[in-house]
Amino acid sequence: MSGSTGRSLAPLRAHLFGRFRLTTLDGREIPISGKRAQAVLAILCLAPGEPIEREQLSQLLWRGKFRAQARASLRQTLLELKRSLAETCPDPFEGSREHVTLRTDALDTDLAELESALAGYRHEQARALVLAIGNQPLLDGLDFGAAFEEWLSARRGQVEQRLQVAIEQSLVGDGTRRADHARSRLREAWHQRGRSRSSDERDIRVAVLPFRAPSDAEDLTVFAHGLFDELVTTLGQVPQLRVAGRGSSRTLQGAALSPADAAKTLNVTHLVEGSIRRHGDTVRVHVDLVDGSDGFETWSGSFDGERTDLFALQQSIAEAVTQELSAALRLRISRPAQRRSTPDKAAYALYLQGRTLTARAIGDGVLAKAVELLEASLAIDPDFAACWTALAEAHVYTAVYTPCLDRLGQSERMAECAMKAIELDPLQGHARAMLGIHRWTLNDPVGALDLAHEAYRLEPHNPDVVLRLGSFLLYIGRTREALPYIEAAVDQDPVNGRNYAMLCVARLNLGQVDGAIEAGRRMVDLGLPSMWLAVATAASGDRKLAVDQYRQTMALMNKTMFPPAGSRPLSGPALYAFWQIAARGVCSGRSIQRKVYCALLENLHATLHDPCDTSIVLPAIWMGQADLVFKTLGTQITPANMFCLMSMWADLEPIRQIRLHAGFPSFAERIGLTAAWEKYGHPDLLTG
């Protein structure tokens, strides 16, 4: 339908976004009389060359008529369309008794032209088409009742998802440096379209709060965890809803917040909450939908089931609640796709307990217990794909959040678990994202980014997957491209401090110091270290405050932060002295203080069990200690230190000394950055 240059070869062009219309190559509109005639042609234009069942068309557009009448009306409409198009396109349709097909050479569409431009890496043409489409919905103004509206809603979701994937593949497919500017312009046009659509459409954002259950009933407590998990997953499959991440929702469990305050904290418009009670052999689940703006109940419902099969009950309730919420919110949604789980209740209960501990992460023995529980679940059901993904996550968290003596061993075990999950269920996007972490340890950021993009295609609404893609782009210096993904993760999971760490660094890398400070403050409010906030504050010029902020991290030692693997924790005057030296070395701006801390880091590099520990790498980057950065990250990237890469891309002194160092090109080649730039585009600071 379109040649390699993007010029249309068809005699007609259909505009599918906004009001449906048909034009000639010179822009003259061809009138199509009758809404149903327009709808028939529009439906065929969505799938040129594909046979469409006459029965489907007649039922969508002539619903309520007798079958014979509806089929006759369709035949008459097709004849009228042929007459209307005869002058320009004499024979647009092919058909049989049961099907009708629009010939692929009969006409082109704005949708097909955009997809062709994206597939051919014609970024400027694609950008122009995206701008022309704007925020117009697909087939706007066509209304033929509930069945047609449901069909159209589903098609709109499919087209949007298809375009999102095509955009992402086009942006990474032509990795030549000459295409950077055109890709950037296309990316901005697409994001602008997304922002316009968000402001133009009803934006329904939902958070599921953990369900309340009797504390003395272990089976109901497990059931409550499972129902919460099922609802988050099931609602997350609805294209019209945006669902807050599990982690953020769990943080409010037991919090004394009003519904309005909870909704504000989670950045949502509605809350789903409920309770579970036992009545003899029956379990009753009560669910409320609460309007976040005023705290009033919008809908409530109760669901009963037998205690003998709580596992099946939680799945059926999740589906029923999703359908009821769609009616209460005036949405038309299809039945959620069935996901692969486990038929074994004991395996599922162990899985939920293991996931809960993994999410907590911090604490003596927490992750070891999580691994134990998840392995017990898999011993019962070794084909439980989601549990293999959860076990992979527990292993990578062990490498990152504990004083682990074998981080590479944990990474290898994580990769084995992730590959097993993908083997059992190819739709496990999160498993691919974690497998990407292991690719970094092998100096293969290209493989890591390939996996992250594929993970995002499979699970575009999973904040962990979204953040992983954004972080990988941040590591290779593609900050402008990374920022929308990081912002999306923050938006969906707003009570996760890790997300704000990424946002703080991204803002700082782009020179947005005030935005970096704001993100850093939020990160600290959520209980994470204040070093990033301090570095941003130092960039603003307030070095005295920055030193104080950096030193405050000392309060988290042996609580949410642990000493380097194999070393004894400091305490008392020694702990204070260490953080005083560190804070002044990174934030004071005085060369003598910087030299003192650099010497201390060199000594740690020579003596610690892990010479590439984060406690060495990160301050070395902030102080522009290039040789030490090359000796650590250039020797071994681990799941624990890989995030340090994101801090190399701030255009600040002394950080920029790393990129200006004569050894930087060979370092970048050695750890795979050069290969990643060839495919995914060069860093923002090394382009132009």
Image (cartoon, grey):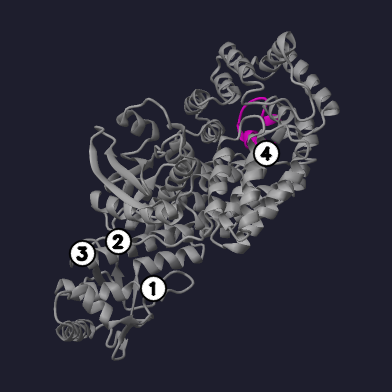
Amino acid type indicated by mark 3: Ala
Residue drawn where x is 25% and y is 71% of the image: 22
Q: Compute the Cα span from label 1 to label 2.
A: 28 Å
Answer whether labels 4 and 3 touch (C-beta < 8 Å). Answer: no
Residue identified by numbered label 1: 8
Task: Please give the label number shown on residue 18.
Answer: none
Q: Amino acid at mark 2?
A: Ser
Q: Quadrant of the C terminus?
A: top right
Marks 2 and 3, how far apart in space?
10 Å
Q: Earlier in the sequence, mark 1 or mark 4?
A: 1
Which of label 4 and label 3 is nearer to you?
4
Question: Element at badge 3?
Answer: helix
Q: Position of residue 82 (x, y in %)?
A: 22, 85
Q: Would you identify the image quadrant in which residue 28 lies?
A: bottom left
Marks 2 and 4 sit apart, C-alpha to C-alpha, by: 45 Å
Q: Mark 1 or mark 2: which is in front? A: 2
Residue that label 4 marks? 368
| Foreground residue among 526 and 683 | 526
* Above or below: residue 33 compared with residue 220: below
Direction top: furthest residue? 573
Crowd tier of the residue under label 4, counting other residues whose Cα lies within 10 Å: few below 14, some 14–19, many 20 or above: some
Given residues 666 and 281, the one toward you in this image is 281
Q: Please report the bounds of the magenta region as a residue range.
A: 640-657
- Is residue 342 in view? yes
